Structure formats: structure tokens, C-alpha cells
Image: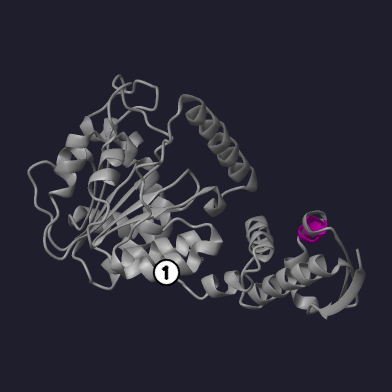
Amino acid sequence: MEEISEVMEVPVSDQSNVFGQFDSHIKKLERQLRVSIVDRNGEVRISGSRTGVKRARAVIHELTELSKRGNIIQEQNVDYAITMSMEENEDVLLEIDKECICHTISGKPVKPKTLGQKEYVDAIRGNMIVFGLGPAGTGKTYLAMAMAITAFKSQEVERIILTRPAIEAGEKLGFLPGDLQSKVDPYLRPLYDALYQIMGAESFQKNMEKGLIEVAPLAYMRGRTLDNAYIILDEAQNTTSAQMKMFLTRIGFGSKVIVTGDASQKDLAPGTPSGLDVASRVLSGIEGIAFCKLTSRDVVRHPLVQKIVRAYENYEAKESSAKGQNPYAHVHSHSGRNYSRRRSRNADHGKKY
């Protein structure tokens, strides 16, 4: 195989960010793409096969541009850039980085970090109801919260309603002391955490006291009609079919709904059909309702989480195959007419959308 060398410049001010602590990012590039990378006074020499050098150059260029925009380069950025370079899909990170949903209370921008996340955000903008399906760490709930708070601050909606079914994850919490709110708070804590980070505790408390932000168990939704609201149902895999139907029929005029869930982490009693699974089959194909399937490639937590998710996906696929079942056969990656062209364009990315 022909070996070549190429030289490119990386500004000294961006080198520590792009190279990573103890050159960890560069070492990963060398291992994954089988190249040698040497830095001398701002000049980076890349040696290896023609394909490996081309990909490494593209990744370093992309990371450098991200650094120039003020981003802190993380291992997840490096992993995703390498994956995209192997698919001959360059400059994806730069395109995604243009999108900023909002800023946290500390000033950190909230942005989609993968193609799947960007398509999820686009689907939320273009549809009244969006189902965000995927494993832990793909940003389903966090991005939905960011979109809800942005819409609330710009007065597109009058209030935010956040809900999730109060189902124990293999533990019994009914013995906890306190009133009803104290008992359900443990179930709703992840929603509070995201609100505090994006909106700030003081602003959240003020709007909650006014009734403009409501965090409640799913059972509280019965009998209500929700107009001009941004409604998020989290952990929807733990709803029954009746609960899901009840929730979806609460929607009033001027409202937007996001339903998030992970079909692989159900806590329902054995044999109880998940409302999320049923909705995926019943509502597929209705215009104005989008189904976004995120995968292990969209995990943006610690890289080890991505490996854990992928390992479980492979294990569950083998188990299902042995039983002659496909646990995701009913999930159609469909988002109405708005996304029919996008789906074909993104076929090469491996996205089911």
C-alpha cells in the first residue's frame, strides 16, 4: 500500500484544544485511521495510506474550525468526526455546529451534536407531535427541554408542561415520607435538573409559582385540555396504551408535544403492552406526527456509555433473532411529508428517519 505524507497548519492557540490532554485526540486518530501524526511548530505532518491521510486531515481541519468558533473539543466530537470521515461525509460537525437552540444559565450554548440530533430538532420545529425514540444519552429529553424553554421565552407558547409516568425502576418508593409531591419528585428529578441548568433555579421557581411551568405525573393530565402549551412526556415506554391515548387526546390549539422514550428500558409489569410501542404502530403515517429514531451513534455522554449501549443493542438483537422477533419492526422512521426527501438524502448516514 502506497504511503504518503501531507503537511497542514493548526494555529498554536488551538493546538491544545484540538490535540487533547496528553495528545489523547491525536493518539485516537492515529489508532483509528492507522496514520502517524507529528507536530512541529504549528505544522502537522500526517503520514500513512492515501485514504487514512485524507480522513485524518479532514478530521483535524474540522476540529480546528470548531475550536476557532470557541468550542471545547471533547472525545465525543473526535469519535463522531472519525465516524463521519469513514463515511466520506466531511464537514458534518461544522454544519451541525451552526445550530444553537439556546444557552444555559452559565452561558454554554445548547446545540445538537450529531446528525440524528439535528434531524430531531428539525422535526420538532416542523411537526405538532414528535416521538423521540432512542437509548439513554442521546439527548432526547434535554433537547426537547431546550426547545420548550426557547419557545416559552420567545412567547410562542404560554406555558410548559412536563410529565412522566410514576413507575418504579424495579424499586418500591411508596414508603417515602412526605406529601404526594414529595413522593413523586424522585420520578421527576431529571426534568428538574434540565430546567435548572437551562433556565436557572430562580427563574424556574418564579414561573412555577405562577403556574406557567408545571412538572407533574402523567396521571394529573386526565380530564384536561392543554392549549398554547409546550408539553413533554418523558419515559413514555412506561405508559400503558390507555395512558398514551389519554395523553395524546389532551392536546389543544397552539400546543406542541414531544414524547420521548427508550423501548429497551421498560419498567411495566411483564405482559403489559407499552403505550409507546402501540403509538408507534397506530400513528405512523399521520401527517404532522414525526417519529425520530436515535441510535447509539447519537449518544453524547461519556464514550463508555456509547459502548455500553451498543453492546446491549447487539445482545438484544441476538436474543430477538434467536426468538424470531424484531423488537423494533413496528417503529417506522417517518415524519410526514416534510421529511420524505431528507430521509432519502440521509440514507448514507445510516439514519432511519
Q: Where is residue 94? Give x, y as percent.
A: 59, 74
Examine the rendered structure and indicate whether residue 80 appears above or below residue 182.
below
Q: Is residue 247 above or below residue 182?
A: below
Q: Quadrant of the N terminus?
A: bottom right
Residue name at image x 64 percent, y 43 percent: 304
Q: Amino acid at mark 1?
A: Arg
Per the image, the residue denoted by label 1 is 342
157 lies left or right of 145: left
Q: Main secondary structure of the magenta part?
A: helix
Residue 110 can be seen in this image = no
Q: Residues within 10 Å of mark 1 (few under 14, many from 20)?
A: few
**Range drawn in magenta:** 23-30
Q: Nearer the viewer, residue 45 or 315?
A: 315
Q: Residue at x 54, y 50 (%)?
A: 299
User: Which SS class for mark 1?
Assistant: helix
* Residue 195 seen in the figure: yes
Vertical arrangement, residue 95 with respect to residue 164, above or below: below
Q: Quadrant of the C terminus?
A: bottom left
Give residue 306's quadrant in the image. Answer: top right
Residue 190 picture quarter: top left
Nearer to us in this view, 299 or 216:
299
Image spot of residue 223 (x, y percent): 7, 43
Query: Where is residue 41 shown, x and y percent of the image?
Result: 90, 77
The residue at the point 50 percent across, 49 percent down is: 295
Q: Left or right: 263 with respect to 44?
A: left
Q: Position of residue 261 (x, y in %)?
A: 37, 43
Residue 8 included in the magenta stretch of the image: no
In this view, the residue farthest toward the front is: 324
